[in-house]
């Protein structure tokens, strides 16, 4: 999902490097860790509302600040790793997330806002850092497996950030502020371990023209100019962004509140059901990607997945359901949401070979900037529609305010029709 810097092939990559495997696992753990903190606030909305004295719009804006820094820093994370290596760049990213957690748990609105921005900026190094270390340390034949496993770490973290964190706070009785303090301390420890474990980068000769070219900031911006001058890039970003919204906003911010306050589910049960959506991503991302490769077509799988998303979203919002069907609908929505990753493949295939790395960074920027911009909009809609019952959120309020998510999926399918088909079946014609 993030910009993956290119790594030069190395002879040592033909054998398994135990230290390298351990380093990659710890980087993947960082990706898990940052996803836990990304989704954890969704299970503590009542506590946050009371502590910060914020309205529904205020809470939505506060949590959405994560994406304001995550998006632009995604553009430069790969460049920083290429320039300075992994040994200090990734731990610095972890420290930023950890400091953000400590500030968020302070109970002060200003500090929490700064903390959320720091969490987003540092998290941009999670996925890209793990893949960067994999390219340096693991055998080339296992790289695709490492990338897929890294993505599953993140989605598992999103699930844990809802179900597990909700259990800690609402069953075990851990204070929400204490959770953030413990999370910050855990991040500091992880950063220290990675500093000790990650090897130093072997720098190329300073007079090397190739080294200068790869390390030039201007050359990095030049590749982004190529990507952003291609209209297909914007179609890919807009399509993926609209398909991400039911997860990033619908589930990870308002999912638990909708189930507990709107449908009056037990808070623990609500968090478990909401956690099925990111868990479904663990299944859906590789499954739909494999299906697309298998048939040699991108657009049928993309549009088909979006259609299943649409049905699941309509059922989730507008059809009465019991606990069992709630789990099934959430899991189905998560699996089908794996279609949002297909535009990440298309954008690579519609742009020149020499900008492949930049396409992922550009996609993350487009996708998550959309989340950042629309997060407060949904908060405003919820606050507006709940005014007729004294500000207390009811199921009908969520159904009305989250209806744009349904239209967004329909719009994504329409946009997909105008995207270029890049599958292998087309190329052989």
Image (cartoon, grey):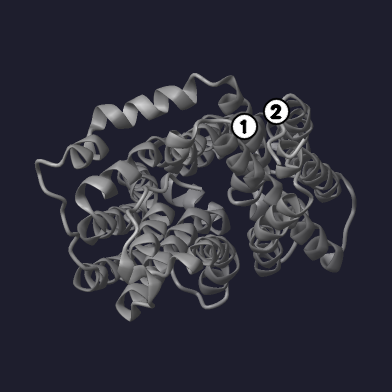
Q: Compared with residue 62, is residue 155 higher up or lower down, i.e. above or below?
A: below
The residue located at (36%, 39%) in the rendering is 73
Q: Compared with residue 183, is residue 258 higher up or lower down, i.e. above or below?
A: above
**Quarter occupied by residue 325:** bottom right
> Is label 1 in a helix, a strand or a loop?
helix
The residue located at (38%, 76%) in the rendering is 15
Q: Which residue is mark 2?
A: 419
Q: Of label 1 and label 2, which has the lower sequence position?
A: 1
The residue carrying pointer 2 sits among few (fewer than 14), some (14 to 19) or many (20 or more) residues within 10 Å by Cα, namely many
The residue located at (64%, 63%) in the rendering is 282
Q: Compared with residue 23, is residue 213 higher up or lower down, i.e. above or below?
A: above
How far across and how far down the image is residue 115, in percent?
Answer: 33, 48
Tag 1 and tag 2, C-beta contact below 8 Å: yes
Residue at the bottom extreme? Answer: 18
How far across and how far down the image is residue 51, in percent?
Answer: 43, 51
> Is label 2 in a helix, a strand or a loop?
loop
**Camera sees residue 380:** no
Q: Which residue is mark 1?
A: 236
């Amino acid at each position: 999902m993030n910009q993956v810097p290119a790594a030069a092939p190395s002879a040592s990559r033909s054998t398994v490097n135990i230290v390298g495997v351990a380093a990659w696992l710890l980087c993947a753990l960082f990706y898990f860790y940052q996803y836990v903190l990304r989704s954890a606030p969704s299970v503590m909305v009542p506590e946050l509302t009371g502590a910060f004295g914020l309205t529904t719009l205020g809470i939505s804006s506060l949590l959405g600040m994560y994406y304001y820094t995550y998006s632009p820093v995604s553009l430069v994370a790969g460049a920083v790793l290429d320039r300075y290596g992994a040994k200090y760049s990734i731990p610095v990213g972890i420290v930023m997330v950890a400091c953000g957690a400590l500030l968020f748990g302070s109970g002060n609105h200003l500090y929490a806002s700064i903390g959320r921005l720091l969490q987003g900026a540092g998290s941009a190094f999670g996925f890209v850092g793990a893949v960067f270390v994999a390219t340096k340390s693991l055998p080339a034949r296992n790289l695709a497996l490492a990338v897929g496993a890294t993505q599953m770490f993140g989605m598992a973290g999103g699930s844990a950030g809802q179900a597990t964190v909700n259990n800690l706070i609402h069953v075990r009785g851990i204070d929400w502020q204490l959770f953030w303090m413990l999370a910050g301390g855990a991040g500091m420890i992880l950063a220290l371990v990675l500093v000790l474990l990650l090897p130093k980068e072997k720098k190329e000769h300073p007079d090397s023209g190739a080294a200068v070219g790869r390390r030039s900031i201007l050359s990095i911006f030049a590749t982004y100019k190529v990507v952003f001058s291609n209209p297909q890039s914007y179609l890919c970003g807009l399509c993926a962004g609209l398909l991400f919204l039911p997860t990033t906003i619908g589930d990870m911010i308002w999912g638990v509140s909708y189930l507990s306050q709107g449908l009056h589910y037990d808070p623990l049960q609500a968090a478990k059901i909401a956690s099925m959506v990111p868990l479904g991503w663990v299944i859906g991302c590789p499954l739909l990607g494999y299906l697309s490769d298998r048939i040699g077509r991108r657009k049928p799988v993309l549009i088909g997945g979006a259609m299943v998303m649409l049905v699941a979203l309509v059922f989730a919002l507008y059809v009465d359901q019991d606990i069992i069907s709630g789990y099934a609908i959430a899991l189905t929505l998560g699996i089908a949401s794996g279609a949002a990753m297909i535009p990440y493949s298309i954008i690579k295939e519609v742009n020149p070979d020499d900008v492949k790395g930049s396409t992922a960074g550009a996609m993350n920027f487009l996708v998550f900037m959309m989340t950042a911009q629309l997060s407060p909009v949904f908060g405003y809609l919820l606050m507006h529609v709940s005014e007729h019952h004294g500000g207390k959120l009811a199921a009908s309020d969520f159904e009305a305010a989250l209806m744009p998510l349904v239209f967004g999926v329909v719009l994504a399918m329409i946009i997909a029709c105008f995207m270029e088909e890049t599958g292998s079946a087309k190329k052989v014609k």
